[in-house]
Image: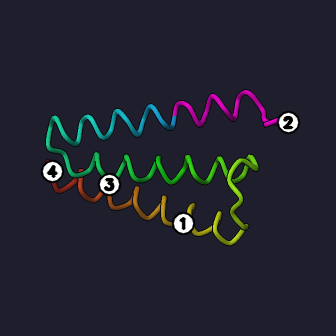
Amino acid sequence: MTGVDPLQLLSVLLEVIIVAGAVFIAVKKQKRSSWAIAATFALYVFFDLSRMGILPFTAQVDGFLFLIANVTMLVAIWLMMQEH
């Protein structure tokens, strides 16, 4: 893991905490939008780990992960609007 920026690691750690928090809210409060938020940030974790060279994904896979993460966040927003 040489050459990995500590700020990038902190960012990934925060993303993992967000995933855990979103799963907790999804289970505890029965919020479907929280599942989509958890999925979004889980995809961001994989994307970031790939960009840091920790996971051996190609640029095409990185692009696909980023696209799906953003689509999943759009779903989360739509679900939030439906919940209110």
- Judged from the image, the secondary structure of the residue bearing numbered disc 3 is helix
Spatial CA span between label 3 and label 2: 34 Å
Which residue is labeled 3 in the image?
76
- Amino acid on which the number 3 mark rests in the picture: Ala
- Judged from the image, the secondary structure of the residue bearing numbered disc 1 is helix
Spatial CA span between label 2 and label 1: 27 Å
- Judged from the image, the secondary structure of the residue bearing numbered disc 2 is loop
Report the side of 76 relative to 50 (left or right): left
Disc 2: CA contacts within 10 A as few (<14), some (14-19) or many (>=20)? few
* Mark closer to the chain start, 2 or 1: 2
Which residue is labeled 1 in the image?
67
* Mark closer to the chain start, 3 or 2: 2
Which residue is labeled 4 in the image?
83
- Judged from the image, the secondary structure of the residue bearing numbered disc 4 is helix
- Say which of marks 3 and 2 sits in front: 2
Classify residue 27 by image quadrant. top left
Classify residue 31 by image quadrant. top left
- Main SS, magenta region, reads helix
Q: Is the residue 52 above or below the residue 15 in the image?
A: below
Disc on res. 3: 2
Q: Is residue 3 magenta?
A: yes
Spatial CA span between label 4 and label 2: 44 Å
Q: Position of residue 36 (x, y in %)?
A: 33, 53
Disc 1: CA contacts within 10 A as few (<14), some (14-19) or many (>=20)? some
Q: Nearer the viewer, residue 21 or 80?
A: 21
Spatial CA span between label 1 and label 4: 24 Å
Tell me where the magenta segment starts and ends, as one range.
Answer: 1-14
Residue at image location 21% in from the left, 51% down from the top: 32
* Mark closer to the chain start, 4 or 3: 3
- Amino acid on which the number 1 mark rests in the picture: Leu
Residue at image location 84% in from the left, 35% down from the top: 2
Q: Position of residue 5 (x, y in %)?
A: 78, 32
